[in-house]
Image (cartoon, rainbow, N blue to C red):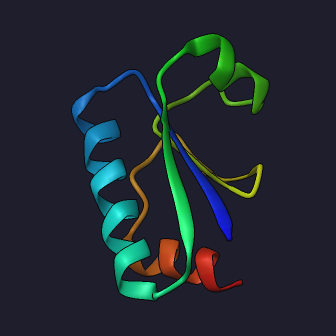
């Protein structure tokens, strides 16, 4: 099972990112857990200082921008 973290304080772009990742998980058919991380101390542990950010299995895939759903699906299937 993949472990996906969406990081951000809850701004509109962070909320949009969460929805995109949620949809990508559903569409990909990959079994994944999705967690929202809004605590800056926890976000910093990933080495992320610009949000929104997405990590898959502990590896940061994007930060500072909203990913496209196709990108997220590709990360999940990798």
Total labels: the figure holds 0
Q: Residue at x 26, y 48 (%)?
A: 16
Q: Position of residue 29 (x, y in %)?
A: 46, 88
The residue at 71%/84% (across/down) is 78
* Figure check: 49 above or below 63: above
In this picture, residue 19 sits left or right of residue 68: left
**Could you say which is closer to the camera, residue 13 or residue 25?**
25
Identity of the residue drawn at 44% across and 47% down: 65
In the rendered view, would you say 7 is above or below 28?
above
Looking at the rendering, which quadrant does residue 22 occupy?
bottom left
Q: Residue at x 68, y 71 (%)?
A: 1
What percent of the width, then of the height, locates residue 59? 77, 53
Toward the left, the furthest residue is: 12
Judging depth in this view, the residue of 47 and 29 nearest the camera is 29
Tell me: 76 left or right of 34.
Answer: right
Counting from the top left corner in percent of width and height, residue 40 is at: 58, 14
Position of residue 33 relative to residue 26, above or below, is: above
**Image location (x, y in percent) of residue 72:** 50, 71
Residue 46 image-quadrant placement: top right
Q: Quadrant of residue 67?
A: bottom left
């Amino acid at each position: 099972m993949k472990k996906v973290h969406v990081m951000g304080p809850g701004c509109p772009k962070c909320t949009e990112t969460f929805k995109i990742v949620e949809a990508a998980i559903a569409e990909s058919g990959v079994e994944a857990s999705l967690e929202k991380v809004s605590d800056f101390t926890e976000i910093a542990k990933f080495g992320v200082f610009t949000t929104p950010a997405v990590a898959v299995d502990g590896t940061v895939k994007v930060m500072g921008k909203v990913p496209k759903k196709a990108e997220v699906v590709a990360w999940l299937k990798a």
